[in-house]
Image (tube, rainbow, N blue to C red):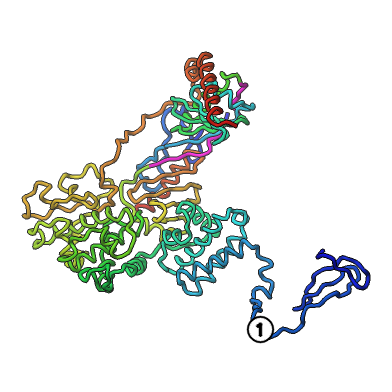
Amino acid sequence: MPGGGHCPDCGSTELVEDSHYSQSQLVCSDCGCVVTEGVLTTTFSDEGNLREVTYSRSTGENDQVSRSQQRGLRRVRDLCRVLQLPSTFEDTAVAYYQQAYRHSGIRAARLQKKEVLVGCCVLITCRQHNWPLTMGTICTLLYADLDVFSGTYMQIVKLLGLDVPSLCLADLVKTYCSSFRLFQASPSVPATYVEDKEKMLSRTLQLVELADETWLVTGRHPLPVITAATFLAWQSLRPAHRLTCSLARFCKVANVELPCPAASRLQELLAVLLRMAEQLAWLRVLQLDKRSVVKHIGDLLQHRHTLVREAFREGPVGLEAGEEEPRGQCGGPGQGKEEVASGSCGLPVGKRPASPALLLPPCMLKPPKRACPPPPVSTVTGDENISDSEIEQYLRTPQEVKDFEKAQAARQDARSVSNPP
Amino acid sequence: TAPLPGTTPLYPSPMTPMTPITPATPASESSGIVPQLQNIVSTVNLGCKLDLKTIALRARNAEYNPKRFAAVIMRIREPRTTALIFSSGKMVCTGAKSEEQSRLAARKYARVVQKLGFPAKFLDFKIQNMVGSCDVKFPIRLEGLVLTHQQFSSYEPELFPGLIYRMIKPRIVLLIFVSGKVVLTGAKVRAEIYEAFENIYPILKGF
């Protein structure tokens, strides 16, 4: 009860603040007498401090929605705005968030999970509209761990029974390439490094298509392949000045983060290009290596379909990678050999094209890490007799038990000495 | 007596379960590849309350860290398995390569607990999960598979290199990799693993 007020009518001290429309009043809760009234009219300067009531507040729709869900929905809208998504995406993402919130498992989840759920809803919306957004981007924006994100994402897709299309590679290439700061000269970008955006995009797309065809994309994170392809496209457009630039330096100049696997993808892509170059007689005589082949990427891409068909052959079903003839195995994609393939195979250098390598994913071409002998046929029935001696080997002798107890007690004492209560 | 593990109307058991049960050839072309069992998870009820501190003190092959996990972790060498023993008397046995080995291992753990002075029994032994793996030996275009079988498949290369295929009949989850290696899990009987593989093989050949 605010200090010292009495009702003039009945003398009661039970005075209550009550707002009647836009006017605040002090009312006696016993007899209803209005003790004081607020000002009914406002001056012009007062009105400047008033705020309009938003539509959602006046309809009372938010009274049904919990504060936690309201916060989540606000985060969804914020994220959509930060990513500059079309407005229709915002409504879809909000709808997904509301749908998810109807499930008790989500309502009771930790705040960290609810935060990540915001990202999941936005990601699903983007995927369904073929808007190339990677999980890495969302995790960076939400300061979330990819492991937590992946768990929530898989759960929500299953829970809502959604059909989420795969990430569109071509669109991702366009978006990602456009983020490279190489299209205008600047203090950090030398003139020889500046490149035309359209030329770089089209060449990168062709290289990514080539990587996809030669099994370098399936099962791998899409971004490092695109980074490697962008680098090669850029180098090959002006090799004279750019061959000296490394992948790491390229990413630094372009102000793009270098993903770890990109270096490995680059080697695999170069190996494929070298294999293709072997099929062109006038390139064979040049004895290209992984540096010099960059100069000819333009020509190789122009004839890529034919060259891939000639340079590689489909492995027959059932042929073990280990049973490969020695000629076919060397210099295949993923082996990363630096010399010209035919030279390392002992063929007369530059005289004949190397015989086609198997067109297989790199993981199938590498030798197995450890020998996997087939397990011996088990004759266990489960009902065998269990000898006492076999069980006793797992039991401590009384002496061992005593020693163990002593050691445990000593450790306890040492602990209590170092950590006085 | 309970039916031997691995028997279903499709795969009746042989007279003695001495050889690994291989699937009968169905009417259509069989793949000729038999998935290998890699892990069996089973549970059994020892039927009495257990004092985990005593077990950890008096057994050589036990570890017990109550702050981390509320069970004793025990291991035996033959069959090479691990068991989680709870104070309620329930036990989980993992790591065996066949149903029979899992049962034998569980019985050995029960004997160890008996020798430690508890009136352990061997009630409701049940195989809870079986994991198998095999290799079809040809590469698989996972992006194509997820397009044609999207209601069963989940392929997110940003998260995991394999495709997760949830088969409805039998109810098995398959992990399919670009190298042609396939992992099958979620089976209660061996026949489900074989059946699931025979179902997926013609689908994979199409990619």
User: In the displayed image of the protein, which residue is found farthest to the right?
Assistant: A10
**Residue A65: x, y in percent?**
65, 65
Amino acid type assigned to the residue bearing label 1 in the image: Ser
Q: Which residues are magenta?
A: B118-133
Q: Which residue is found at the position 29% from the left and 67% from the top?
A: A205
Residue A277 magenta: no
Q: Residue at x 53, y 34 (%)?
A: B42
Residue A247 sits in quarter: bottom left
Give SS at disc 1.
helix
Is B119 included in the stretch rendered in magenta? Answer: yes
Judging by the rendered image, the residue that carries numbered circle 1 is A45
> Against A318, is B79 above or below?
above
**Compared to B76, does A217 lie above or below?**
below
Nearest the eye: A257 or B118: A257
Q: In the image, is A242 to the left or to the right of B172?
A: left
The image quadrant where one finds the C terminus of chain A is top right
- Image coordinates for residue A362, horizontal then vertical, percent: 27, 50
Q: Of helix, strand and loop, which mostly describes the magenta segment?
A: strand
Q: Is residue A322 above or below residue A186?
A: above
